[in-house]
Amino acid sequence: MTSILAQANADVRLDAHLVDYLLVAFYFLLVLGIGYMARRSVSSSLDFLLSGRSMPAWVTGLAFISANLGALELIGMMANGAQYGIATVHYYWIGAIPAMVFLGLVMMPFYYGSKARSVPEFLAKRFNRTTQRIQGVIFAVASILIAGVNLFALGLIIEALLGWPLVVAIPVAALVVLAYTTLGGLSAAIYNEVLQFFVILALLIPLTLVGLNRIGGWEGLKEKVSAGPGGAEQLSSWPGTELTEIANPVLSVIGIVFGLGFVLSFGYWTTNFAEVQRALSAKSMSAARRTPIIGAFPKALIPLVVVIPGMIAAVLLPQIQAVKAAGGSVDGITYNDSLTLLMKELLPNGILGVAIAGLLAAFMAGMAANISSFNTVFTYDLWQDWIKPGKPDRYYLQVGRWVTVIGCILAIGTAFIASGSQNLMDYIQALFSFFNAPLFAIFILGLFWKRMTGSAAWIGLLSGTVAAVTIDVLVRFDVLQLSNQAGSFVGASAAFIVGVGVAALVSLSGQPKPEAELTGLVWSLTPRASRTHSVEGDDAGWYRSPKLLGVLVLILVVILYILFF
């Protein structure tokens, strides 16, 4: 059973009072109400699955980042903050922001401009139907597996915080997500993700401020971290040898920059439809390009209220101090318990209820993002384009609703698959190396190399996946002496290199599409005018420039790295 099960311990059970339960109940009713209201705007499959492409940029931008801000990340990254210190910021500043800016500036003009309704459908336009179908199946499987991770973790939190049995907590949590996504489709998911973003902050900000006040501010935190296990090295981000578990500083930096900052990061943020779907629901090309970049601003600042509380937990809480001194679990307590123990230590009743709602919100955001992207890919790419083409739109709207129900039921099953993992973060990083890194390899090659063929795309995709799975198996059976985390970095890198190499070799022996069919799908064959957007009406104003916003968020990251070097 995963180490997060330690949260079921009596030591981490929160003393929730009636006011806390009422706040949680109010939150559940609120998200269901949003789903009911969103239902009135659903009259077609495009409305249900892509919000009718009508969302403003600030809404899609916040939903973009909220869909990623699952409580699994909160627990995992806070645990990493407690264990590794400031180096955890790499998952955000180099492991997310550059890829988000690249998605907005470079890739969204192709996604949005092609009028593709999903990433697999874009692959059909660029390559062929075979690539679309293979990636559609791969993505559907990945979505259900990752939704199961979020659902399992949510069930564990409900069990630990509220005392409900796991067999009850998991179906109840799934039922709430199912209710609002079935009612209002993607619109309900997006509006709830915006709400959930602020509810999550209502958990993290008080936790950080009260924690810093308790230990004497930032200077007090630095003093206590320096005096503890890991020492002053945990106050600097580079070279991050503890984080990567690569002793050589140069190789550690290379692992962070290439394995995390390029392959895993770009593979996730630029091709993961659970994220891209939010941008595709925007009402214009400009809004779609701004979506990931708007989301990058809070993403850059979130480490201040996730990583720092983890560091606070490591010097404030006796249980986490004991774990850190021992280098592992002590009496069933692990680093994964940092968030719950910190909530128990610092937050009074009332605020505790808001915090519990924030934790539940984070899990539901992560699960809803995967379920809403699963139903879109299954309905459009597998059912409409492959299995049952030519039906009326109303038929596909009903398919989308039923697939949402089926997706939630399957997620309950995969939640129990996730329960067999010893470490949920290792499990989900391995899934990313299997499913995202190979897709990024063929996507980026096809975007910039017009010679790439359709056969090369699906053969390269499968080859990269096999490479990542092979590395994972070799690590698990100790053939490769790597930690699971380092194994994911290496596996993702292998998936990218093998995918690109195989695709290039196959392309050289095949016939590419005529150039006339690749306009708007390949960089060199797409006129600059086709990659630009309107600057009139709602898209007017220098402050709405995607390039300016992209430069500003990259400058912000550089400043943050200087402060925490």
Image (cartoon, rainbow, N blue to C red):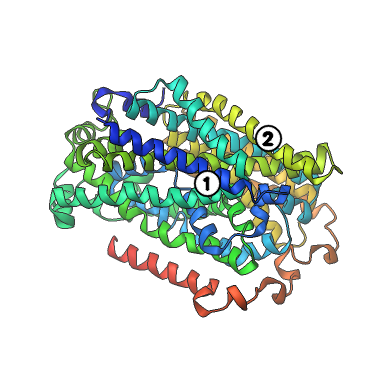
Q: Is residue 561 found left or right of 458 in the rendered image?
A: left
Q: Is any atom of residue 90 visible in this view? A: yes
Viewer-nearest of discs 1 and 2: 1
SS class of the residue under badge 1? Answer: helix
Q: Position of residue 45 (x, y in %)?
A: 72, 47
Task: Tell me where residue 399 sits by quadrant.
Answer: top right
> Mark 1 near mark 2, Cβ–Cβ under 8 Å?
no
Crowd around label 2: few <14 · some 14–19 · many ≥20 (10 Å) = many
Q: Residue 155 falls in which quadrant of the image?
A: top left
The residue to which callout 1 is attached is 34
Which circle's residue, 1 or 2, is located before the other in the chain? 1
Disc 1 to disc 2, C-alpha distance = 20 Å
- Residue 446 is tagged as none
Above/below status of 165 relative to 308: above
- Left or right of 3? Residue 233 is left
Residue at 48% x, 59% y: name it. 295
Disc 1 marks a residue whose amino acid type is Ile
Q: Residue at x 59, y 48 (%)?
A: 38
The percent position of residue 388, horizontal first and vertical second, equals 83, 38
For the residue labelled by badge 2, is the local secondary structure a helix, a strand or a loop?
Answer: helix
> Taking 14 as reference, is 536 above or below it?
below
Image quarter hosting the N terminus = top left
Question: Mark on residue 403?
Answer: 2
For residue 67, say whether it is visible: no
Which is more toward the observer, 542 or 189? 189
Q: For mark 1, does the 10 Å Cα neighbourhood hold few (<14), some (14 to 19), or many (20 or more) residues?
A: many
Where's residue 390, x and y in %? 87, 44
Look at the picture and state if 357 lies above or below 496. above
Q: Nearer the viewer, residue 214 or 404?
A: 404
- Amino acid beneath label 2: Val
Q: Nearer the viewer, residue 337 or 199?
A: 199
Q: Quadrant of the C terminus?
A: bottom left
